[in-house]
Amino acid sequence: MKKIIVVSLLSLMLAVTAVGVADAQVMQRISPTNVAPGQTVTVTVTGTGLTPCTVAISGSGVTLGSCGVNPTADRATFQVSAAGAAAPGSRTLTVSMGEVIQGFSFNIGGIAAPERGIPTGITTAQGFIDALRTLTDWLFVVLVVISVVMIVLAGLQFITGAGDPTGVSMARTKLIWAAVGIGVALLARGLPEAIQNLFGV
């Protein structure tokens, strides 16, 4: 009985520690994605683990301000100014943060593409990895929370079971499924990096 409680507590500590692991540096999207000639907009890059960045844009007639990152490292902002004579059309806005460099589509004039809840650029391999990373991060959190609840319930069932074979068996089953949930969560967390390394993306 004491061994099972100790194992439950160790599993709980592992789950809490795993949740605290810092996210990798990921740029997900920018907003807004356009500026009218003769106007200035503040562009926000959203993501995780963001660091001070440098920005560049293709073409001429556009001026970019310096890039700053908020204290929680999930947003970076900079200004984009289009000259009145800037040629309308699509440009490539490149954001560099250390070794991570990502290009975004940016319009001069016209209407911006609608914002989406998933990372833009899914047509590229890196876009797929970013979308997969977002999905597995959510899956990791959900599975760890469910596993922690199952561990607590199993511990309570062990204590209140008072040696009843049925109660102990049900508690053991919950504990096993909680361990499986934590294992799947950890595997899901490493899946994007495994795919990235396997295919050299």
Image (cartoon, rainbow, N blue to C red):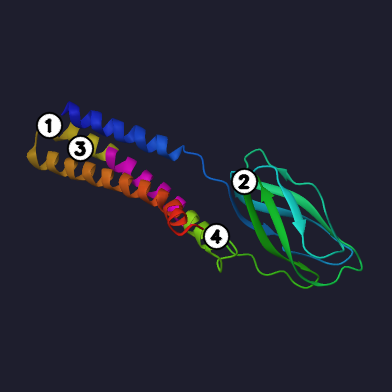
Label 2 belongs to which residue?
A: 74
Q: Which badge, 4 or 3, is on the more N-terminal residue? A: 4
Q: CA distance from mark 3 to mark 1?
A: 9 Å
Q: Is residue 149 visible?
A: yes
**Residue sitting at x 51%, y 62%:** 128
Q: Earlier in the sequence, mark 3 or mark 1?
A: 3
Q: Which mark is residue 157?
A: 3
Question: 76 or 173: which is nearer to us?
Answer: 76
Magenta span: chief secondary structure: helix
Q: Which residue is mark 1?
A: 162
Q: Is residue 50 magenta?
A: no
- Identified by mark 1, the residue type is Ala
Local crowd at mark 2 within 10 Å, few (<14), some, or many (≥20)?
Answer: some
Could you tell me how far apart the alpha carbons at marks 2 and 4 are, in whole angstroms?
19 Å
Q: CB atoms at circles 1 and 4 under 8 Å apart? A: no
Q: Is residue 147 magenta?
A: yes
Q: Which residues are magenta?
A: 135-151
Q: What's the residue type where badge 4 is placed? A: Gln
Q: Which mark is residue 126?
A: 4
Q: CA distance from mark 4 to mark 3?
A: 46 Å
Query: The residue under label 2 is which amino acid type?
Result: Asp
Q: How many marks?
A: 4
Could you classify mark 1 by the number of other residues whose Cα lies within 10 Å: few (under 14), some (14-19), or many (20 or more)? few
Residue 190 badge:
none
Is label 1 in a helix, a strand or a loop? loop
**Distance (Cα) linking label 2 and label 3:** 41 Å
Which image quarter: residue 157? Answer: top left
Q: Position of residue 90 (x, y in %)?
A: 75, 70
Image coordinates of residue 100 in percent, x first then y, are 62, 50
Compute the Cα span from label 1 to label 4. Answer: 54 Å
Q: Is residue 111 above or below residue 21?
A: below
State which tag comes first along the sequence, 1 or 4: 4
